[in-house]
Amino acid sequence: MNKLLKLIIFLLASSLVEAQEFQGYILYQYTYLDSLGQDITSEMGPKMGLEQHYFIHGGNYAGVNEHGVLVQLYNANTNTYFLEMGGEIKSIPGDTEFPKQLEIQKSDNRIKVMQHECNSIVFITEMGTTTYYFNENISIDANHYDKHRFGNWSTYLREANGAIPLKFMTAMNGFTQIAEAIEIETENVDDQKFDILNYIRKE
């Protein structure tokens, strides 16, 4: 009976750990390929970025590049998405449906990212084709992002059961951008990370 009780407690504890939402930091490294698959990172990286330092907690996330400049920020309280464009920070309502044309293809392609076995899914839009690789052990509650339609983020999270992509490849305009996690840290993230005023003052 004691062994059975210990087993039940262990299984309950394990399920709680697995169900815990990810909160923390992911460092993505970018590489770029031309239409022939040749590495053009040295050419494209300085213009489009080489890294994204990504922080997420609950319904908010923020990413800055290798220079500390804002790449993107989403605040669930206002359902607003912010991005840097032409040296200025632009705001977009999170419920903006863009891109509008979307085809989702299931994929059997599996890869390993930082020892995490990843499934994949393919999104095809008028802007390009993006393949997402994800592991469900690193995930958040997709319900936080129900209103986040810009970039098809809410749709992606529903398809991936809330898993944060550990790698994503976007083919567009004759080249491919590849972002791959090279560091993943579970840590407390201060809400100040998601206050757009901090980034506007910094600029």
Image: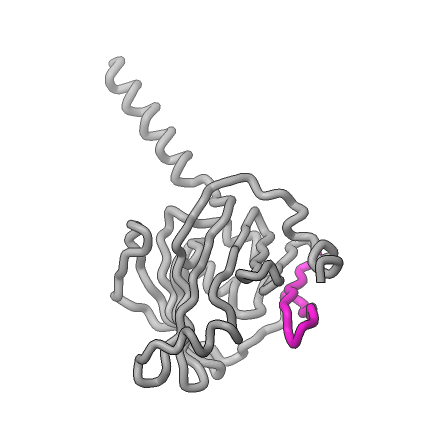
Q: Quadrant of residue 12?
A: top left
Judged by its main secondary structure, the magenta piece is strand
Which quarter of the rendered picture does the N terminus lie within? top left
Name the residue located 48 percent from the left edge and 62 percent from the top edge. 51
Residue 72 percent coordinates (x, y):
59, 63
In-front residue for pair 47/161: 47
Name the residue located 46 percent from the left edge and 55 percent from the top edge. 27
In the figure, is residue 199 to the left or right of 128?
Answer: right
> Does the segment drawn in magenta span residue 152?
no
Residue, far front:
42
* Rendered position, 146 above or below 184: below
Number of dots carrying numbers: 0
Which quarter of the rendered picture does the C terminus lie within? bottom right
In the figure, is residue 63 to the left or right of 180?
Answer: right
Task: Determine if residue 96 is in view.
Answer: yes
Residue 67 percent coordinates (x, y):
57, 61
Residue 61 percent coordinates (x, y):
58, 54
Name the residue located 39 percent from the left edge and 78 percent from the top edge. 40
Residue 197 percent coordinates (x, y):
74, 56
In-front residue for pair 3/68: 68
* Rendered position, 69 above or below 56: below
In the figure, is residue 118 to the left or right of 72?
Answer: left
Task: Determine if residue 103 is in view.
Answer: no
Q: How is the image coloured?
A: one colour
**What stretch of residues is rendered in magenta?**
78-94
Q: Quadrant of residue 99?
A: bottom right
* Rendered position, 32 above or below 54: below
Name the residue located 61 percent from the left edge and 62 percent from the top edge. 69
